[in-house]
Image (spheres, helix red, strand yellow):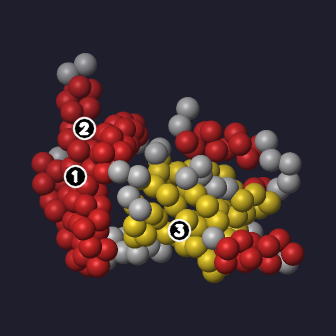
Amino acid sequence: EGHIQQKNWAITQARYPHVLSLDADEVVSERLLKEILKVKENWQADGYYFNRMTNYCGKWIKHCGWYPDRKLRLWDSRKGEWGGINPHDKFEMEKGTTIQHIKGDLYHYSYHSISQHVLQIDKFTTIGATEAIKNGKAANIFLLVLKPIWKFVRDYIVKLGILDGYYGYVICSLSSKALFIKYLKMIELMKQVKHS
């Protein structure tokens, strides 16, 4: 099973309906902890977003489209469930629910090395391509060529990845490469389906 199924199962194991969901590589900042404790005393919404700040190879990334990476991680579990497309899961609240943003950062310790990031790209692009094909999406030469170029320009220039220095360039380059690889794998899967 994928991330989504595992996380939905985990919710059923919670003792109380209000859930704070963190991944193994995430840590609550002191300020965020104080805000969560305030919410616990006076629950006013059905769910709460936080900003997630990522540490990449020892550097906090503040641009590249990576910050603020808003995540819905505190909610009433009776009013939603995990959804999205593997490996990119997200908690989806029911219609009519209220969601608020609270201050403080969720620290995300993502990749300790560029090599680790490259290995994860191979894994996630395989999962992403497979899920995309399962969901009826298609890839073509137009997407293969233009989308990765646009992703780099958007993340490095428009979203100011350039301000994150060397690692900003690395992140934007690898993110663009990951999109290229995902489309390559989708085209390969489409050919396999066509010839089977």
Residue at 67% x, 44% y is 8
Asked whether the residues under the numbered discs 1 and 2 touch, taking CB atoms below 8 Å apart as contact, a structural biologist would say no
Q: In the image, what residue occupies the spot 85% across and 78% down? A: 42
Classed neighbour count for the residue bearing mark 2: other residues with Cα under 10 Å, few (<14), some (14–19), many (≥20): many
- The kind of secondary structure element at disc 1 is helix
Mark 1 surroundings within 10 Å by alpha-carbon count, few (fewer than 14), some (14 through 19), many (20 or more): some
Image quarter for residue 130? Answer: top left
Q: Nearer the viewer, residue 21 or 76?
A: 21
Question: Residue placed at 36% from the left, 38% from the top?
Answer: 123
Vertical comparison of 138 with 52: above or below: above
Task: In the rendered view, tell whether residue 109 sits above or below residue 138.
Answer: below
Report the amino acid beneath label 2.
Lys
The amino acid type, in three-letter code, at marker 1 is Lys
- For the C terminus, the image quarter is top left
Quadrant of the image containing the N terminus? top right
Q: Does 23 sit left or right of 41 as displayed?
A: left
* Contact? badges 3 and 1 (CB < 8 Å): no
Could you tell me the amino acid type at mark 3? Arg
Q: Residue at x 35, y 51 (%)?
A: 113
Q: Tell me the tag on residue 185.
A: 2
Give the camera-side residue of 180 and 110. Answer: 110
Which residue corresponds to mark 1? Answer: 177
| Image position, residue 36 (x, y; %) | 74, 72
Against 128, residue 164 (above or below) is below
Q: Position of residue 9 (x, y in %)?
A: 70, 39
Q: Is residue 100 visible?
A: no
- Disc 3/disc 2 C-alpha distance (Å): 29 Å
Residue 63 position by quadrant: bottom left
Viewer-proximal residue among 14 and 111: 111
Mark 1 or mark 2, whichever is nearer to me: 1
Is residue 28 visible in this depiction of the protein?
Answer: yes
